[in-house]
Image (cartoon, helix red, strand yellow):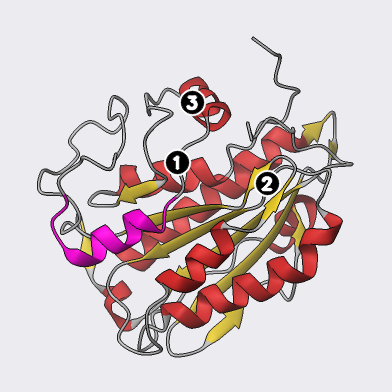
Amino acid sequence: MAYTVPATSKTPALIVYLLDVSGSMGEEISGKPKIEIISDALHQVAVRMVQRSTKGTTVAPRYRIAMYAYSSQVTDLLGGIKTVAELAQMGVPRLQPMDATDTAAAFREAERLLNAELGNLQDCPAPLICHMTDGEYNTGGDPEPIARRIMNLAVPDGNVLIENIFVTDKALTQAVSDPKNWQGVTDETPLASPYAETLLRMSSQIPTTYASVMAEMGYRLSPGARMFFPGNAPEIVELGFAMSGATPVTPVMAP
């Protein structure tokens, strides 16, 4: 499973965002509320998806996007799956911090969506779930068993990918100081909390094709690293969301 099917108008990539909007997202990192950092990074990745889908003046439907915010409840921010062109017209919703953190409910919603869609995605790139949170769930139970079920779902291109962006300075024992030259988190990277370890187990390995796209953007992530991003600074959050849109858009040549 090489994750080589490109995102095209006929084989669009499905990206599902699960966004923690619990009350703690109102706290600051680097002098800016976390919720604003997330909203800005989401806007930037949406712009990049539009750029990667534009031919002349036409935005090709290379990406299909679903977006859920969760606290004690899960909210569908887009009203179902939208094409990248529809998202460009709608704009990325601004997020507001709410109350508790039911991460399991968000992953159950993603699982429901994937089970409904997977039959139509057999010729498409493997779907990707991008989960962003800033702390451990405090209601609803453990999300890891649900995430493992999702990671076992597959299309011919590969298993469903799960990416986690952990917006905290308590993920790594040593903070990332140079995002552009950072090689990512591996199973050997020392982590600073049990929940960081849980999220790492819930994170897929970065496919070689995704690492190549990120290299074109100036990053040096190792293909063997995990899709786990310790967002101790806005630059790492931006890197994590950039990864979510890194599906190949041109055919990958055989070596």
**Residue identified by numbered label 2:** 126
Label 1 or label 3, whichever lies nearer to me, is 1
Q: Is residue 22 left or right of residue 251?
A: left
**Residue identified by numbered label 1:** 205
Q: Residue at x 38, y 42 (%)?
A: 226
Magenta stretch contains residue 199:
yes
Q: Residues within 10 Å of mark 1 (few under 14, many from 20)?
A: many
**Residue identified by numbered label 3:** 217
Residue type at mark 3: give it: Met
Answer whether labels 3 and 2 touch (C-beta < 8 Å). Answer: no
* Quadrant of the frame with the C terminus: top right
Of 140 and 98, nearer the camera is: 140
Answer whether labels 2 and 1 touch (C-beta < 8 Å). Answer: no
Q: Residue at x 15, y 59 (%)?
A: 170
Residue type at mark 1: give it: Gln
Per the picture, the main secondary structure of the magenta-coloured stretch is helix
Residue 77 can be seen in this image: no
Of 89 and 127, nearer the camera is: 127
Q: Which residues are magenta?
A: 191-203
Q: Is residue 136 positioned above or below 185 on the image?
A: below
